[in-house]
Structures are given as C-alpha cells and as structure tokens.
Image (cartoon, rainbow, N blue to C red):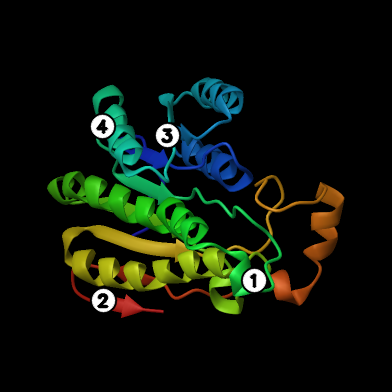
Amino acid sequence: MLTTDLTPHLALITGTTGGIGKATSRALAKLGCSIAVHYHSAEDAAKELVAELKGMGVRSEFFQADLSVYDEVRSLHASVLSTMGAPTILYNNAGLTLKHGITSIADISIEEFEHTWRANTGSAFLLTQLCIPAMEAAGWGRVIFCSSVAAFTGGVVGPHYASSKSSLHGLIHWLAGAYATKGITVNGVAPALIQETKMLPGSDEELAKSMSSPFFRAWPFYAVVCSKLNLVES
C-alpha cells in the first residue's frame, strides 16, 4: 500500500543541501513528514532549508557531520535521536567524488579510495545499522540509498566513486531480503547527472548539455518490495 500521509514519521536525509536532498525533503514535507536535515559544510543552506520546511508546517532541524568520519556518523544519529526522535525513514543520499575525470588507476591513492568509500558506502552502512532497530520496533521503516549511473557504466569520475556506488547494490538486496517481513522496505535510486549537486565541475549550462547524452541518463535499477505475504523482485 502506498503511504501518502507521513505525518507520524521522521526522515533523516543525508546531504540535504544538494539538489537531490533539497527536492526530496520538500516532497516528503508536502506529505507531512518531519525532516532531519544533514549537512557537511553548507550551514547557511541548511538553515535556509530548515526555515523553508518549517514554513510548510513540519518539524525540521539541521545537523552537521562529516560522514567520512564514523564517530561523526554515530554522533549524527545520536543528535537526531535526542532532538527529534528515531527516524523511520532514512535516505542515504550524501556522496562525494574527490577527483574527476580519472583515466588511470594510478591517479587515485589508496587513501583517496578509502576516504571515498567511507563517505559514500561505509557511512550509509553504519547509519542504516543505527536506524534499523527503531524501525523494527515500530514495525515500519523505509531505507533508500542513492547510487549512481556510474555503478552500471563506470561513469566519468573514477574507479573510487564508481566502486563505492556499485557496492551499495549488493547491500540493498541483502537488506531488503533480511527485513522484508518486518515492515521495512529497502530500495535504491541510480541518478545520472543532476544539476545543483556540486559534485561535478562545470556550469549549469555545461552540465545541462552533458545531460543530453544517453551515456548520462539514469539506468533501470532493481528494487525489492515486500508485503506480509510475499517478496517480489522487479
């Protein structure tokens, strides 16, 4: 059953000050959902968004964390819990690229590789691990991961980014199967180029031109949905 009244629920969205995060927070707020706004460095943008969401009649607060540091991920969850309550919706949306246009694997150090994986993959795993117990207790939860078209094509950023996103797919499938009978759905989205994310260089006009290429269009993504009676993969 499609839930269109999210008034009882709280969504924690990471990377909320980017284009995808902002659009998602506004869409959920229109359905009555409270929003925990996470940001890394764009504090002014986070404050503006929270004010906008409160103007829509929902609860909203902002929380800072560097998701490449696991202790800060834990602190983020603890702060949201103490300030707003336990999230029943988690959107692991935040991501970083570090470098762009990598053509040789030698151009990425193991330190840069690990940093990207901590921010894009490890933090999403840890935050999901922290949020799911409350969802289990409530008998209802929604977990969404933001992957990328780069997970399918390799993309134009580099091996550090593409691999950090493709690894989410196996995690999504495992989580979906493990929690399907507990009222928790786990899904992923795989966008292509998105303006206003600030993850790729170039002006809005240059990015818009790139979006016309089929290479940069979003790919179909397997999602697992569940009901009390069966598990359907589509």
Mark nearer the N terminus (4 vs 2)? 4
Mark 3 vs mark 4, CA separation in Å: 11 Å
Residue 96 relative to residue 233: left or right: right
Image quarter where the N terminus lies is bottom left
Helix, strand or loop at mark 2? strand
Residue type at mark 2 is Leu
Q: Which mark is residue 2?
A: none
Residues at circles 3 and 1 in contact by the CB criterion of under 8 Å: no
Q: Residue at x 45, y 42 (%)?
A: 14
Counting every numbered tag in the picture gives 4
**Label 2 sits on residue:** 231
Q: CA distance from mark 2 to mark 1?
A: 32 Å
Mark 1 crowd level (few <14, some 14–19, many ≥20, 10 Å Cα): some
Q: Is residue 219 above or below residue 94?
A: below
- Where's residue 99, x and y in %? 64, 56
Tell me if label 3 and label 4 are in contact, CB under 8 Å.
Answer: no
Question: Which of the two discs, 3 and 4, sits closer to the camera?
Answer: 3
Q: CA distance from mark 4 to mark 2?
A: 32 Å
Q: Position of residue 229 (x, y in %)?
A: 18, 73
Q: Mark 4 belongs to which amino acid?
A: Ala
Residue 106 vs 184, above or below: the answer is below
Q: Residues within 10 Å of mark 3 (few under 14, many from 20)?
A: many
As drawn, the label of residue 78 is: 4
In the picture, the disc for residue 155 is: 1
Write down the residue under mark 3: 65
* Disc 4 and disc 2 in contact, CB within 8 angstroms: no
